[in-house]
Image (cartoon, grey):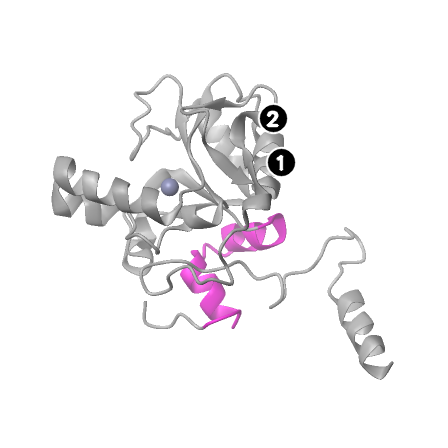
Amino acid sequence: MEIETTRLARINRDVNASTGRTKPNAQNAPILINRDHPVSESAAVTESRLVPANSRPGIRVLDAGIRLDRTCLEQLDALLEAVNGKDDIVVVSGYRDLAEQTEIYSSSLQSNGPEYTAKYVALPGCSEHHTGLAVDVGSAAGGLDFIAPEFPDEGVCGAFKAKAAEFGFVQRYKAHKEHLTGISCEPWHFRYVGADHAVIMEERDLCLEEYVGSAGYGEASHGN
Ligand SMILES: [Zn+2]
């Protein structure tokens, strides 16, 4: 009984009275996945959470087989609606299993070489795409390259980027954070972390390595 009361008090404390949204806390902290933090079994996405990206009306996809975590897709849909971007922005990549990432990695090694691959392709097991919470988007006007689609700062893509945090997305790999993320600037790769976290990360200019480490959420990531 006492435990229940304590739990309830904690839950109440974690809800923002004005917005009704859950405040950032250790329980809802975003999962950090990078070369030093491979996806663990506990973080592995369950099949039941994955839905086809084109199951939402009007969402354009590079491949009909692309799937995303259902919450990630709902928020992506809302973000695309908010910027009127469904005609111009295409979902290029979403959830990938280990076999798919292994194939992408080795085919990039063959066609693009080791330097390019190290910059833009995560090692199998170390990709956020394994969670279904990462989405690559490209401008329909661009070439829609699978690994590095064009996603300019201007126009509808710029509007998408500017509003992304409100809908829970962060541009995961920025140019000035390369030494921390280990990945080169990727204007096209967005990670869903939830709006509460995303807004703080944007305001304080923190990449996920810094955010998870500084807040003491989950496993510390010092020295990445
Ligand atoms: Zn990506």
Residue 167 seen anywhere in this rendered image of the structure: no
Residue 38 seen anywhere in this rendered image of the structure: yes
Tell me the residue at 76%/72% (across/down): 10
Residue of label 1: 74
Q: Label for residue 126?
A: none
Question: Residues in magenta?
Answer: 194-219
Is ligand 1 less than 8 Å from the beta carbon at label 1? no
Residue 94, above or below 198: above
Crowd rating for badge 1 (residues with CA inside 10 Å; few <14, some 14–19, many 20+): some
Q: Quick one: 159 or 195, which is closer to the camera? A: 195
- Residue pushed farthest bottom? 2
Mark 1 secondary-structure assignment: helix
Residue 204 among those drawn in magenta: yes
Is residue 129 left or right of 87 when viewed as pictured? Answer: left
Q: Earlier in the sequence, mark 2 or mark 1?
A: 2
Residue 60, above or below 171: above
Q: Amino acid at mark 1?
A: Glu
Q: Quick one: 60 or 181, which is closer to the camera? A: 60
Quadrant of the picture in which ligand 1 is shown: top left
Residue of label 2: 56
Residue 149, above or below 33: above
Q: Amino acid at mark 2?
A: Arg
Screen quadrant of the C terminus:
bottom left
* Residue 103 percent coordinates (x, y): 26, 42
Residue 47 among those drawn in magenta: no
Q: Are marks 2 and 1 in contact (CB under 8 Å)?
A: yes
**What secondary structure is the magenta-colored segment mainly?**
helix
In which image quadrant can residue 7 be found? bottom right
* Residue 201 percent coordinates (x, y): 51, 54
Tell me the residue at 45%/60% (across/down): 32
Q: Quick one: 219 or 50, which is closer to the camera? A: 50
* Residue 58 percent coordinates (x, y): 57, 19
